[in-house]
Amino acid sequence: MANDAKTVIENGEGILGIEFGSTRIKSVLTDASHAILATGIYDWENSFTDGIWTYPMEQIIAGLRGSYASLVSDVKSKYDISITNLAAIGISGMMHGYLPFDAEGKQLAGFRTWRNTMTAEAAAKLSESFYFNIPQRWSISHLYQAILNGEEHVKDIAFLTTLAGYIHYRLTGEKNMGVGEASGMFPIDPDTCTYDEKMIETFDAMIADKGFAWKIKDILPTVLNAGEKAGSLTEEGAKLLDESGVLQAGALFAPCEGDAGTGMCATDSVDPGTGNISAGTSVFSMIVLEKNLKAPHEEIDVVTTPDGLPVAMVHCNNCSSDINAWVKLFAEFADVMGLDVNIGDIYTKLFTDAYKNGDKNCGGVTSINYFSGEPVTGLVNGRPMVVRTPDAAFSISNFMRSNIYSAFATLKYGNDILLREENVKTSRMMAQGGLFKTPLAAQQMLSDALASPVTVMDTASEGGAWGMAVLAAYMLNKGDGEKLGDYLHNKVFAGQSGTTLEPDPEGVKGFDEYMESYRKALKAEKVVADE
């Protein structure tokens, strides 16, 4: 295998996927059969600066280079060679947000990420005018809020994009993106697989009195479908990506996609009736719709698959951050006690103990994991907190189980609306993300939360970077006319194994009981967070 991999890399046949996650930028190098040859990692964190969740531009570029350099180092360590050429590249990133530039390419405002909840006024007005739910984190919400705020830079915007769209532009010179990523900027018409023309006209009318020199379509990226060629690596792009100067220009680019789209590809969930859940800093479920929703719901977004099919998305801003904070605290305790403990082992031990020994309803312990605001439950700000009844069974297993339940509680809140009001059901629900590294624990709790079978594939921990590499491979092979769903079934996941867990009736009952306490605790959360 090592020799075959070495030949692939030496011949410039490797396929690179890079995903900008909230806490990690991951690079994955695969061959044409989607087998992983090498990986690279760059850890980073957003900052809360002047009331805005952001990443400075210099940190974004440093992260791109750092992740690729880590990949190059892995290739060197495994195969004793360098990467000089690549067959294809794809860029993915956390969706939505706000990155505006003028005609000379000057950044006009700091990057406003998906995590911000400062666009409530804009989102509400757009949703009413479009009769379509426009979430706060969408790019159009950020743009319209900036207009409502009278921000001076808006008149100078020549290009508005997302993080993935920006990196794609820097590497290729092309201002385009995949339809799934674009669906988090502005609503998509599933019949045309581009921006909804009626809503385009409505928005232009809403801002006509401002006298801007641009109309909304002038500044949005061009929309491409999965399998289309989206550009190639330029000389400048190669130098930006690889500071050593070894990588040559010329690699073809797939349309950049958001983490939602790459998650769907990484879990073989792009056909109608299929669904997937991605759990990281945020958690979201994606269910590919058989038909349009009856009505808009502020808790549910309608985005698309990478090939343009409508998807009901329940996106929750908060998932693993509070768990990570508690594990860090336990690691510090171990250090104070003079114990040499691997932090990965702490996660595994705590998750396993919560799964085996925790009460199904967490024994009266309730956690609210809101580091930031949570639009699904109407919270503008977040304050992590733990509450318990005086007679609670306050054990480490119940405490940790409560934290894991909290990571899925808001997701359940939104999915209950889909099931009860829209009768949306799935033939299968796939899950991916770091929370599922410990076998069975979080997977069973998620199954109980949704009262639905949940499958975790063996590739689940590879995540979106691998999913993006799969989309890049699909672009190279699209000449045979195979649809994306068929390609995934026949070429990527054929023969792949996974673990499916059915909901445990006692677990379902326990999670429902936990949710009663959770909803009551949200009242206190709102009081504290609004102070």
Image (spheres, grey):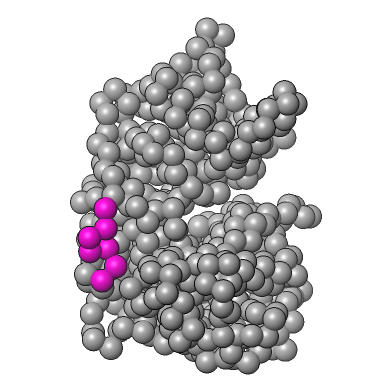
> Where does residue 401 sit, x and y in percent of width and height?
47, 27
> Where does residue 420 sit, x and y in percent of width and height?
27, 41
Residue 429 seen by the camera: no
Give me the residue at 49% from left, 84% from top: 10
Give me the residue at 23% from left, 80% from top: 482
Depicted 383 relative to depicted 275: above or below: above
* The N terminus sits in image quarter: bottom left
Depicted 383 relative to depicted 262: above or below: above
132 on left or right of 209: left
Give me the residue at 48% from left, 16% from top: 364
Which region of the structure is painted magenta?
491-497
Residue 482 seen by the camera: yes
Q: Is 494 part of what is drawn in magenta?
A: yes
Depicted 338 relative to depicted 195: above or below: above
Depicted 234 relative to depicted 62: above or below: below
Main SS class of the magenta portion in the image: loop
Q: Nearer the viewer, residue 407 or 65?
A: 65
Q: Quadrant of residue 44?
A: bottom right
Q: Nearer the viewer, residue 21 or 524?
A: 21
